[in-house]
Amino acid sequence: MTLPSKTSVMIVGGGPCGLMLANELGRRGISAVLIDEKASTAFNPQANATQARTMEHYRRLGFAHEIRDLGLPSDFPTDIAYFTRYATHELARFQLPSAAEAKKKIHSLSGSWSAAELPHRISQKYVEQVLRQHAEKLPGISINFGWRMLAFRDQGDRVEVDIECVADGRQQTITADYMLGADGPRSKTRETLGYRYSGETGVVRDFMGGRMYAVYARCPGFYDTVPHPPAWMNVCFNGERRAFMAAVDGKGEFAFHTQLKPHESEDNITEADARRMFQMAVGKPVDVEILSHGAWTAGHALVADHMQKGRVFIGGDAAHLFTPTGGLGYNTAVEDAVNLAWKLAAVLKGLASPALLDTYETERRPLAVRNTGYARTFADSLGLYKPVPEIEDDSDAGQKARETAGAYLAGHGRAEFNIPGITFGGRYDGSAAIVSDGTQPPPDAANEYTATACPGGRPPHCWLSETTSLYDTFGFEWTLLCMNPDQASTHEIEQHAQKRGLDLKIVSAPQARPLYEADFALIRPDQIVAWRGNSADQAGEALAQILGYNIQ
């Protein structure tokens, strides 16, 4: 099969970032060709946590419910539990709601967790399948696994991309207006642009630093062997075999990751060795089938020097590389795509100046630095805390050691997994795509989120009814949130948007005024507060300023 020879956007990489961009562009009528050299979406579990902000974006696209229905059974607890070994001593447990409980609980939450969606614990492999299925239904979107990029050339007015079919070596060149390289940590796109990662790497810790070993395992007898209640994340804490393990399906499939010891050579690890590693962490004999296994490196907190050059952008792991503590890498990648898509669409449709695209890097790179920093902090907290030799002993000293470790790990669990501030508090202050009102946002804090309509951040959330979120009323593109009952004052901006061909939805929500502290708020297509104030005419001026045109 020959791929389209021309497209608006070329996407290199079929992970969450690339697939999300395809969905966002296709919904806006922008054509895109996506390639990935893998045969299909991910087989291995990879990332296992979808944060609440990402779920809100899936809700905006209309398939959050599909994501929430996949992965673990709806009644499976999403606890984080710490053990000496899984079948021996439980040290601590941070309890979180199941998917079914989350659906009910979300409507009654306030404060830091006032949101349209709660987090969902699901393997990335399932998420990618949903993203692919929806992207393939969109007109103008061509999804192609089994193709690799050979080279690209930014010609100033277009990008030429040479690609090759992995199966038979057929080659062709695709011409695109723009290109996104979402081609992973060994990104050919980033390398060709001449950008390097900067930040922290090569960190060695007792755990979550240096070489790790991943095992995708099937062990249906696990829950019969382990005498403790099920948990989504299971952390093994002893001096012999440190590991973390996420439940993939709640029935017996697990994503198991263990720290390699200095004497363990990854090149020599066999399937039998991988099986013994798993069984060692369990602490009792269990039958286990190894579905896949391989090494990877923890201890990265890296961000590319830049995320754009000319008509070429990078996102996802190509732009930032995380140690997986906090579950921030995949979620940051999704928001890269959400941020870039509406800007590309606005420029390609002639609705915005090309200068708008410069705000992708100015907005997303600081967020990547912020988020990799938080992940590093969590990795230090867990990985630098070492088990004492007697922690598994059946003695008073062993019992005391377990109590001490349990108290510490309970505190760590709350810090790493109750993170509304990280989830909702990312901001784009200082961006040209934000019109400041001179106010200052609350301080950035991992474990606390204070809702604010200060331009540059996530809109304050509230429920309008038992089932309708304020976010459900927002338009897919621009929204003017009106919290003054006098709707006649919006006539001019509506006329202005219609004349310019802008999709602007007017939403009346006077009950939200205490949250927004203004009569009006302009909400961007990526559900970020772009401006707030007390005059709809000023909202029109803000829209023109952001998109880079003069009001006539």
Image: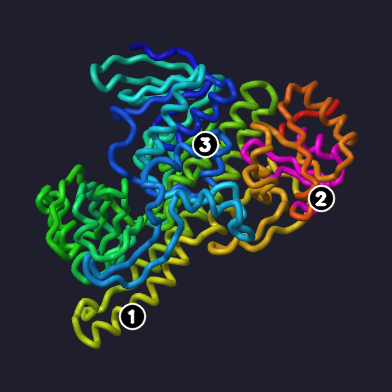
The residues tagged by marks 3 and 2 sit, at their Cα atoms, a distance apart of 30 Å
Looking at numbered disc 2 in the image, what kind of residue is underneath it?
Answer: Ala
Crowdedness near tag 2: few (<14), some (14–19) or many (≥20) residues, C-alpha within 10 Å: some
- Say what amino acid the circle numbered 1 marks: Glu
The picture quadrant where one finds residue 208 is: bottom left
Mark positioned earlier in the residue sequence (1 or 2): 1
Mark 1, Cα crowd under 10 Å, few <14 / some 14-19 / many 20+, is some
* Mark 3 or 2, closer to the camera: 2
SS for callout 3: helix
Label for residue 328?
Answer: none
Which residue is painted at 61% across and 36% down in the image?
358
Contact, mark 3 vs mark 2 (Cβ under 8 Å): no
Q: Residue under label 3, please give it.
A: 337
Q: Quadrant of the C terminus?
A: top right
Left or right: residue 204 versus residue 362 is: left
Which percent across, then down, holds residue 521? 76, 44
